[in-house]
Image (cartoon, helix red, strand yellow):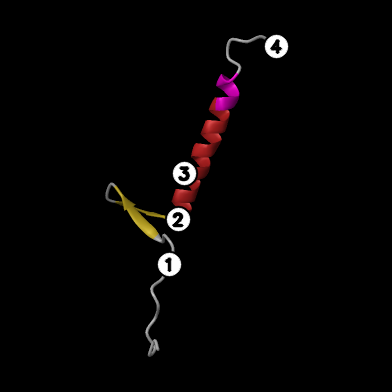
Amino acid sequence: MSEGRQLAQTGLGTMTVFGVAVNEKWLLLVAVALVVVAAAALRLMWRRGRGVQD
C-alpha cells in the first residue's frame, strides 16, 4: 500500500570524495583505469631481469 509514494531509489548515483561530487561514470572510468594500469605493470614487471630464453 504505497498510496502514491515512491520507493527509495537504489544504486550509487553520486557520491562525494574529498568534497568533490563524483558520479558513477567517473567511478567506472577510474576503476577501468586502475585495472589497465595494474595489467600494464604486471606485463612490464613480471619477467623483469629475465632473458628471452628464460
* 21 lies above or below 7: above
Q: Amino acid at mark 1?
A: Thr
Q: Specify the label residue 24 is tagged with.
A: 2
The C terminus, quarter of image: top right
Tell me the residue that label 3 is attached to: 30
Q: How many marks?
A: 4
Locate residue 36, reporting x and y percent.
55, 36
Marks 2 and 1, the one that precedes in the sequence:
1
Secondary structure category for the residue under label 1: loop
> Disc 2 and disc 4: Cα gap in Å?
43 Å
Secondary structure category for the residue under label 3: helix
Q: Specify the label residue 36 is tagged with.
A: none
Locate residue 37, reporting x and y percent.
52, 33
Q: Dots 3 and 1: beta carbons under 8 Å?
A: no
**Residue drawn at the location 52% of the way across and 32% of the way down:** 38
Q: Dots 1 and 4: beta carbons under 8 Å?
A: no
Secondary structure category for the residue under label 2: helix
Residue at the outermost left position: 19
> Disc 3 and disc 1: Cα gap in Å?
21 Å
> Disc 3 and disc 2: Cα gap in Å?
10 Å
Tell me the residue that label 1 is attached to: 10
Residue at the outermost front position: 1
Q: Amino acid at mark 3?
A: Val
**Residue drawn at the location 56% of the way across and 26% of the way down:** 42
Which stretch is magenta?
42-46
> Quick one: 20 or 9, which is closer to the camera?
9
> Quick one: 7 or 27, which is closer to the camera?
7
**Residue drawn at the location 40% of the way across and 77% of the way down:** 7
Q: Amino acid at mark 2?
A: Glu
Marks 3 and 2, the one that precedes in the sequence:
2
* 6 lies above or below 21: below
Tell me the residue that label 4 is attached to: 52
